[in-house]
């Protein structure tokens, strides 16, 4: 029977269990968070554009030094690069989707674009890890695993509003008709 050194009695074999490192954690295929932008694929200059992440905890079974290892990865921090020089994070806030049809709603993760153009919103999610070697206690991985999501393209447009006094039914040739 294998036991930890502190628990060894008499002639029991002492086996040094391996440590699952951050480098080991980064070799796992941790799925990136799904990144979303609202409204998309187009938004308006000067309007709040909502971004949010959807990430799930994940479990892995691997082997290290001949020992079976169970690993848990839990999303704990998020950072967005809005593509125009603006950024948010790292933050514990993952954001949330807006209600159907909602526009220009300020959220904890929203961004206001000040220039028109095409941008790519990128998201990095940091995962906390813990591991168990050969059914032993769960131990923390020293450090966080940062995982990048695929960029989300967004086009920022401008909108011009004009008010007209003409009644288009009475004057179909009037301004704005």
Image: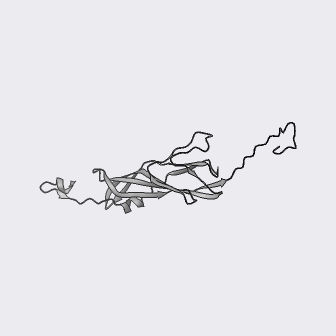
Residue 149 seen in the figure: no
Q: Which quadrant of the view contains residue 126? A: bottom left
**Residue 45 located left or right of residue 71:** right
Q: Residue furthest top?
A: 170
Name the residue located 58 percent from the left edge and 43 percent from the top edge. 105
Left or right of 70, for residue 153: right
> To which quarter of the image does residue 85 belong?
bottom right
Instruction: Point out residue 49 in the picture as x, y percentages from the top left corner.
Output: 59, 49
Residue at the limit of the structure toward the left, as seen here = 10
Q: How is the image coloured?
A: one colour
Q: Position of residue 89 (x, y in %)?
A: 47, 54
Residue 127 image point, x, y percent: 41, 54
Q: Is residue 140 left or right of residue 100?
A: left
Report the number of numbered marks. Answer: 0
**Residue 158 appearing in the image:** yes
In front here: 43 or 57? 43
Quadrant (top left, top right, bottom left, bottom right) of the C terminus? top right
> What x and y, as percent, mark residue 130?
34, 52
| 49, 152: nearer the viewer | 49
Which residue is depicted at the point 39% across and 57% down? 144
Q: Which of 63/39 is in front? A: 39
């Amino acid at each position: 029977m294998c036991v930890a050194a502190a628990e060894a009695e008499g002639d029991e074999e002492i086996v040094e269990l391996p440590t699952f490192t951050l480098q080991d954690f980064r070799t796992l295929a941790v799925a990136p968070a799904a990144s979303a932008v609202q409204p998309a694929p187009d938004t308006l200059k000067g309007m709040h554009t909502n971004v949010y992440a959807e990430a799930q905890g994940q479990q892995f079974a691997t082997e290290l030094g001949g020992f079976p290892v169970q690993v848990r990865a839990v999303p704990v921090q998020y950072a967005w690069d809005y593509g125009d020089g603006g950024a948010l994070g790292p933050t514990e806030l993952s954001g949330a989707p807006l209600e159907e049809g909602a526009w220009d709603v300020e959220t904890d993760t929203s961004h206001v674009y000040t220039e028109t153009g095409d941008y790519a919103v990128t998201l990095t999610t940091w995962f906390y890890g813990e591991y168990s070697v050969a059914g032993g206690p769960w131990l923390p991985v020293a450090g966080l695993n940062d995982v990048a999501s695929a960029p989300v393209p967004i086009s920022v447009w401008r909108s011009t509003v004009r008010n007209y006094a003409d009644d288009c039914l009475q004057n179909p040739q009037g301004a704005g008709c």
